Image: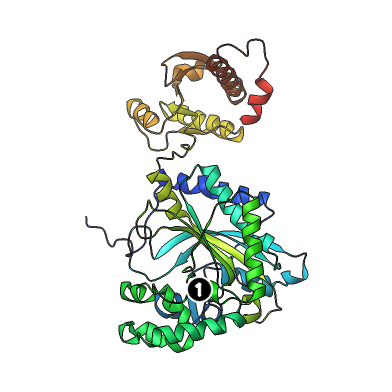
């Protein structure tokens, strides 16, 4: 039978044998962010379109070309979130977090949506981990979130990422820069794409971020923003660099980084890989001191970053970094007959309540088919239950790796199985250490693991 439909272009199914990789790195991200004082926030997958128009910027590629926007049944314009910062900023204002202790440190893991041409490292639905620090203008904060990203990469064993750094100044000092850009691009406007011709008057900095190869070539000799930033922005940037130097975080200055969203001010940065093709930016962020004010709130200097989990996994795969496999089934209880099936259901319920990963037959397979299934799911132990086992209240516990069997009583089996596992783990650990733990009681420690 033909499949009714396929996944929408630019989206992907993450299957069970791959999901654990996402879960592994996501948990590490949240744990490390927690050490820095960040707390998780969860915001809606869609927002009022105006939020992104005002926050992200009407002249950005995101707003002009990439947003999934529709009218709901009430006639309101709604947009699937293309990024996480605007929603977090909206929640910060709506729930009055500016009245709490500042800075507020928020983090999130979410799905975002952009209508772009799908290619390696770029999807129309993608996952992001992000952090937002709201309520501080200090350059120490800039260095702290950069160090957070750096620690995530280090913990995962990712190497070879280059930190690229720039300052795009404040709205005041950017005025002179905009004039210089207009003069530069005006003399070359016959080569610009139609979108960039519209940006020339409104926001010429957006031309620097255009994805058109022709516009990119035209922009390569454009004036650099660092030649135009004011004294305050220059001093802030120098302080950021000094903090990074003190923290032994290497970086290169890239005066062409402007980031793709209009809310950025002063510090912008990217962690870039050369191992995943054209879409090499694994993490990007910076400061957005005017965003909260633009959304109707008080002046609240803020900053953050977003990290694409899909691209990060691509880098890890390219570098041969293995992610620990998820735990498999501890024990499979194979019943033969209806009475044994009832007993098996009760046994696995007790085992699961004790923290053991246990499964039993829910299909009605033959014993041979059950053993094949147990092997496929990676069961460490199996136990067959039939009329003889039920009558004698004992069964044989089989180690699937070694083939060894052990007699086990069915009464209080969950507790005795836990004791058995602890003994087995103790023996295996001692053997791996060459007998160094002879005479040491590790049961209390191992018991905590189960």
Q: State the residue in front, 219 or 270.
A: 219
Residue lying at 43% horizontally and 75% vertically, measured from the top left:
208
The C terminus, quarter of image: top right
* As drawn, 404 above or below 159: above
Residue drawn where x is 63% and y is 64% of the image: 238
Residue 332, image x, y percentages: 46, 29
**Residue 97 spot, x, y in % from top left:** 72, 69
Q: 168 above or below 328?
A: below
Horizontally, residue 395 falls left or right of residue 364, namely: right
Give x and y (percent) for residue 61: 42, 76
Q: Residue 277 occupies which quadrant of the picture?
A: bottom left
Residue at point 32%, 65% (across, down): 9
Location of the N terminus by quadrant is: bottom left
Q: How many marks?
A: 1
The reply to whether residue 308 is in sight is yes
| Front residue of this view, candidates 62 and 68 | 62
Residue 93 horizontal side relative to residue 351, left or right? right
Front position in the image: 323 or 424: 323
In this picture, is 381 found above or below 320?
Answer: above
Q: Secondary structure at mark 1?
A: loop
- The residue carrying pointer 1 sits among few (fewer than 14), some (14 to 19) or many (20 or more) residues within 10 Å by Cα, namely many
* Mark 1, residue position: 261
Q: How is the image coloured?
A: rainbow
| Outermost residue, left side | 1
Give left or right: position of 284 versus 115: right
Residue 321 lies, with reference to residue 83, above or below; the image says above
Residue 68 appears in view: no
């Amino acid at each position: 039978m033909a499949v009714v439909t396929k996944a929408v272009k630019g989206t992907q199914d993450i299957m069970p044998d791959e999901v654990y990789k996402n879960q592994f790195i996501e948990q590490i991200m949240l744990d490390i962010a927690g050490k820095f004082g960040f707390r998780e926030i969860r915001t809606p997958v869609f927002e009022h379109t105006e939020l992104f128009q005002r926050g992200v910027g009407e002249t950005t590629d995101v707003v002009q070309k990439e947003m999934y926007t529709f009218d709901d049944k009430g006639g309101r314009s709604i947009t699937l979130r293309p990024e996480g910062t605007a929603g977090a900023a909206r929640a910060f204002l709506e729930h009055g977090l500016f009245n709490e202790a500042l800075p507020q440190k928020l983090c999130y893991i979410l799905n975002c949506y952009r209508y772009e041409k799908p290619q390696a490292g770029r999807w129309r639905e993608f996952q992001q981990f992000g952090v937002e620090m709201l309520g501080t203008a200090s350059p120490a904060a800039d260095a702290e979130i950069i160090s957070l990203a750096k620690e995530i990469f280090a913990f995962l064993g990712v190497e070879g990422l280059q930190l690229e750094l720039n300052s795009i100044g404040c709205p005041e000092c950017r005025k002179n820069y905009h004039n210089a850009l207009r003069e530069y691009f005006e003399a070359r406007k016959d080569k610009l794409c139609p979108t960039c011709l519209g940006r020339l008057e409104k926001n010429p900095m957006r031309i620097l971020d255009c994805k058109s190869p022709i516009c990119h070539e035209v922009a390569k000799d454009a004036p650099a923003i660092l030649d135009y930033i004011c004294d305050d922005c220059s001093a802030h940037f120098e302080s950021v660099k000094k903090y990074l130097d003190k923290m032994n975080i290497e970086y290169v200055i890239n005066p062409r980084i402007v980031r793709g969203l209009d809310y950025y001010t002063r510090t912008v940065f990217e962690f870039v890989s050369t191992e995943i093709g054209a879409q090499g930016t694994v993490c990007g962020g910076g400061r957005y001191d005017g965003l909260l004010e633009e959304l109707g709130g008080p002046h609240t200097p803020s900053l953050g970053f977003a990290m694409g989990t899909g691209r990060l996994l691509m880098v890890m795969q390219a570098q041969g970094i293995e992610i620990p496999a998820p735990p498999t089934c501890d024990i499979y209880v194979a019943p033969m007959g209806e009475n044994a099936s009832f007993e098996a259901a009760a046994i696995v319920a007790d085992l699961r309540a004790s923290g053991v990963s246990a499964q039993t037959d829910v299909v009605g397979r033959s014993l041979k088919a059950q053993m094949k299934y147990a092997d496929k799911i990676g069961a460490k132990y199996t136990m067959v239950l039939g009329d003889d086992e039920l009558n004698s209240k004992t069964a044989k516990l089989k180690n699937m790796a070694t083939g060894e069997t052990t007699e086990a009583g069915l009464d209080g089996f969950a507790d005795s199985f836990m004791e058995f596992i602890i003994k087995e783990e103790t023996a295996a650990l001692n053997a791996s250490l060459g007998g160094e733990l002879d005479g040491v009681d590790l049961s209390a420690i191992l018991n905590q693991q189960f």
